[in-house]
Amino acid sequence: MDALAHVVSFLPPLLAAMPLTLFLTVTGVVFGLLMGTLIAVAMVYGRRTSAWPAKAFTFAFRGTPLLVQLYLIYYGLGQVLPGTFIRHSFLWPYLRDGLWYAVFALSLNQAAYNAEVIRGAILAVPKGQTEAGIAVGMRPFTILRRITLPQALRLCLPVLTSDVIILLKSTSLASTITIMEMMGTARMMQRQSLLIFEPLIAAGLLYFAVVVVLTRVMAEVERRMTLYRQPARPQQG
Amino acid sequence: MSNIVVKTALALAVASSVALPAFAEDVIRIGMTPEPYLPFGQVNAAGEWEGIEADITHALCERMKVKCEISAMAFDGLLPALKENKLDVAVGAFSITDERRETVDFSASYYTEGTSLVGPKSEQVTIGTVDAPDGTKILDPKAFEGKILGVQASTVQHQYVTKYYPEIEVKAYDTADNSMADLAAGRIDFVLSPDLYLHTFLATPQGAEFDIKAAAPENKVLGEGVGYVVKKGDAATLKKVDDALASIKADGTLDKSIAHWVDGKK
Amino acid sequence: MDGTLSLLSWGDTGWSDDLFWGIVTTLKVSISAYLIALVFGAVCAVGKQSSWRAVRFIAGVYTTVVRALPELLVILLLYFSIASGIERLVKGFGLADDTFQVSPFWAAVVALAFVSGAFMAEVLRAAYLAVPLGQIEAGLALGMHRGLILVRIVAPQMIRHAIPGMGNLWLEMTKESAIISVLGAFNDLLYVGYRAAAGTRQYIFFYGITAVLFLMITAVSVWAISRIERRFSRGYR
């Protein structure tokens, strides 16, 4: 079948673009988790001056489409750049390419979603744990670091892992700001070959494969981090 | 519900969908792109199509005496949609090239324009022409070393840079406006774009800081004029379009439209 | 700032009315796609409970594959294939004459619905399984047939469990409808925002307004969903 041959021929360039997709995903996960935790802590423990902006942040980034956020950040910043000193500074290589805008937008978006989830998890950690920490004389930050956060993160791990899959799929939107990850490469191949379906089907196959692998990886990560909750297995010997 | 009835119905459906191609007899499906691309076309703030192509397409439909269904579609979706038989005619200031002729058919050309390179006024460069491996004259690639070129995706300019400057970093934008936005932001150094669009852009306040650095020498890759695109082998539609186009040229409607949009806008 | 404000005037020189109609289009697309997604989801949820393995398999493939692929990819694929596929079928059956053409609007709506339907199926399935089995058994003991049980007993109780998930899917839908702006064929809110921004080069201003308008849609939806949730939780709090 002719179509099948085309699909196969489109696979190599897409495979070459896969590292970029994975890079966007990983940076989004890492920064999103770091920022999300900070924001969640601000929402739970912060005074009004820090809790309120945090709440506004999550409201704004969860309430608007990622595509709008991408355009606003990329073209919006592009509108103010001309004539400023930034073009001659060391920052320029980062602001020139669309890649870092995508990382920024994806991270902020992910941070907002993570923050809400982590916030719920922090509130779900049994109060007795915190009280025990106070009784022992720990300072608030230490309680947070050693008692609350580790348990909170474990509580919301399933949701966080499914958020990673969602992030992987969202990286496809980066193709709209000239980034040649898998989706962008597929659309470029569409234009060159004038074939609508074959490049998309090839990309679909690869995305599916990556998601299946990633889901397995995340399930294993989840299992390892919640070993204490797994049912006991009979001892050998 | 009988299993046999269901299975037969499914079989018939599959068979008929394979056997019968979709024909449009008295209706012509036209695809146009609403992205701003003056003077050829755009959808203005009042929601109306305006520009050379809007005028000519309306006139065309009148002369052809058919019902025209115009659907809006993103520029780089037009040619694939034509190929997959979702449209009969595609309109989008398509340049006529031999390479495109391999997959689609063109009407007679209704406008010829060149391609130019635009960049910031502050950058003084002189770009000469050299001979390409295939013997044609092209802009000197040495001028682009270390720079980033911008083009609109799926255009002949895009094909031009892919063919002659494979080592230069190129960014392809889904719309011409977005390529200009990034040029203004300084993310790219030059944009290779058709002349008419550039003239419109340079006349705007944002275009004041840019000027044309060089005109690309004529090249078959860059096209031999702008025309309507029809599915390959669709001789019936092509003839209708060509006849109507000839009549529009003959009675001056075409020239009037061009004068209004091009010279009025210059 | 005066000049900027004038960009927002109503009518031919300003963009306010375009933005308004953009919101209307986005809502039209979202509502239509949501209702069709309900149908897809319900059919698939029923399919997953079926006693025929083939039906369960197809339903499983639908939810797994669609949830693993980026929405942008699925929408691009379906937008082009739905129209030609349905056109061919319908014309082949002779149900419509040669001028029949699936409008781009419905092609995009069905594409969006197809994506959300997979998630909707999971929400509906979880809600169905949350209804205690004893309720269904009691109905059977009373001699009710399956259809009556579904309508009188299961459905009212299902709704309460389904609302949070369905509410989230609605919020997702309003944001996902922004993806159709990539098709360039509709004046949905994001596309109007793009045209305004590109036409006037005021990217920050118009993308910012677009974001705010999406935020408004979200805020109103969140309020409405919480009202609905409260209504259906009567008797349980």
Image (tube, helix red, strand yellow):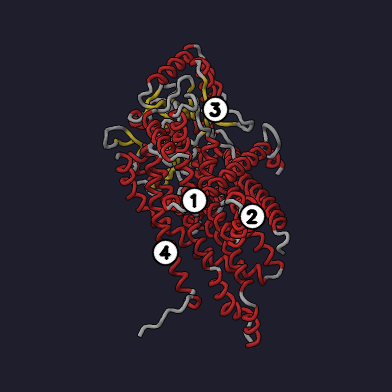
Look at the image and tell me in which quarter the C terminus of chain B lies.
top right
Q: Which of these two is toward me, C92 or B129? A: C92
Asked if residue B201 shows in the view, the reply is: no
Mark toward the viewer: 3 or 2: 2
Q: Amino acid under label 1?
A: Gly
Residue with the mark numbered 3: B266
Q: Amino acid at mark 4?
A: Arg
Q: CA distance from mark 4 to mark 1?
A: 26 Å
State the CA–CA distance, disc 3 to disc 1: 63 Å
Camera-nearest residue between B167 and A73: A73
Tell me the distance, in whole angstroms, between the alpha carbons under discs 3 and 4.
60 Å
Q: CA distance from mark 2 to mark 1?
A: 20 Å
Mark 2–mark 1 CB contact (< 8 Å): no
Residue that numbered label 4 is attached to: A216
**Crowdedness near tag 4: few (<14), some (14–19) or many (≥20) residues, C-alpha within 10 Å:** few
User: Is residue A228 among what the camera can see?
Assistant: yes
For the residue pair B79 and C233, the one nearer the viewer reads as C233
Determine if marks 2 and 4 fall on one subunit.
no
Q: CA distance from mark 2 to mark 4?
A: 38 Å
Q: Nearer the viewer, mark 3 or mark 4?
A: 4
Q: Chain of mark 2?
A: C
User: Which residue is pictured at 32% across the width and 33% down the height?
Assistant: B137
Classify A168 as above or below C28. Answer: below
| Label 3 Cα neighbours within 10 Å, binned few <14 / some 14-19 / many ≥20 | few
Residue at which label 2 appears? C153
Q: Earlier in the sequence, mark 2 or mark 1?
A: 1
**Residue holding disc 1:** C47
Q: Circle 1 marks a residue in which chain?
A: C
